[in-house]
Image: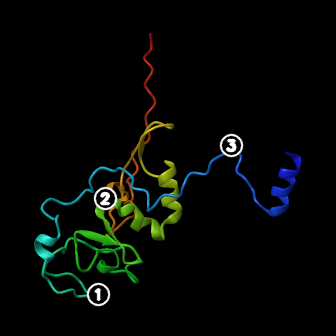
Amino acid sequence: MRNGLLLLLLSGVILPAADGPKTPPAPAGPERIEVPPPPFSDGIFPCTNCHAGMPVDRTRRELTAMHTDIVLKHDETHRWCLDCHDPTNRDFLHLASGERVPFDESYRLCGQCHSEKYRDWRAGVHGRRTGNWNGDKGYLLCAHCHNPHQPRFKALAPKPAPQPPTRSMP
């Protein structure tokens, strides 16, 4: 037995320990996170209701026919609609690689530029997460709290300071 073990060690063959730690296999693709549906404006989705068959116009311009209520204040000197929205199928977004992602996976798109926020969101320290620390968790999409076209929160007007209660004399 001892000579057999020595021979195995010298030959470079390493046998896994029967009770040793197991490494789980890497996931096949990106992990899908359960989120509520995106907060679309009424009557705006699916986008292909209007955009199907429209020619793709990549020209950066002010929108005058539709979506005039959208003002881009999200790295607007470098970004435009088709940097995030898929040009050939508007019912999807797309990553920098060109991979299409549905709107309910928009966290993958946001996470490309905002990786620290994405990491914190996944850990439950950025944004609202519900559920159990050791069980199922519920997440909100970035767009549930941030307007993706103008993601900064608007300034809040301060409320007046609380007034101390008046003491009544006996």
Which residue: 22% across, 75% down? 89
Closer to the chain start, of discs 2 and 3, is 3
* Occupied quadrant, residue 31: bottom left
Q: Nearer the viewer, residue 109 or 25?
A: 25
Residue under pointer 2: 104
Per the model, the C-alpha gap separating discs 2 and 3 is 42 Å
| 27 left or right, relative to 76 | right
Q: Position of residue 37 (x, y in %)?
A: 26, 53
In the rendered image, the residue lying farthest to the bottom is: 59
Which residue: 23% across, 79% down? 88
Per the model, the C-alpha gap separating discs 3 and 1 is 61 Å
Q: Residues within 10 Å of mark 1 (few under 14, many from 20)?
A: few
Which residue: 35% across, 60% down? 105
Q: The residue tagged with tag 1: helix, strand or loop? A: loop
In the picture, the quarter occupied by the C terminus is top left
Q: The residue tagged with tag 2: helix, strand or loop? A: helix
Q: Position of residue 36 (x, y in %)?
A: 29, 50
Residue under pointer 1: 60
User: Mark 3 touching mark 1, by CB under 8 A?
Assistant: no
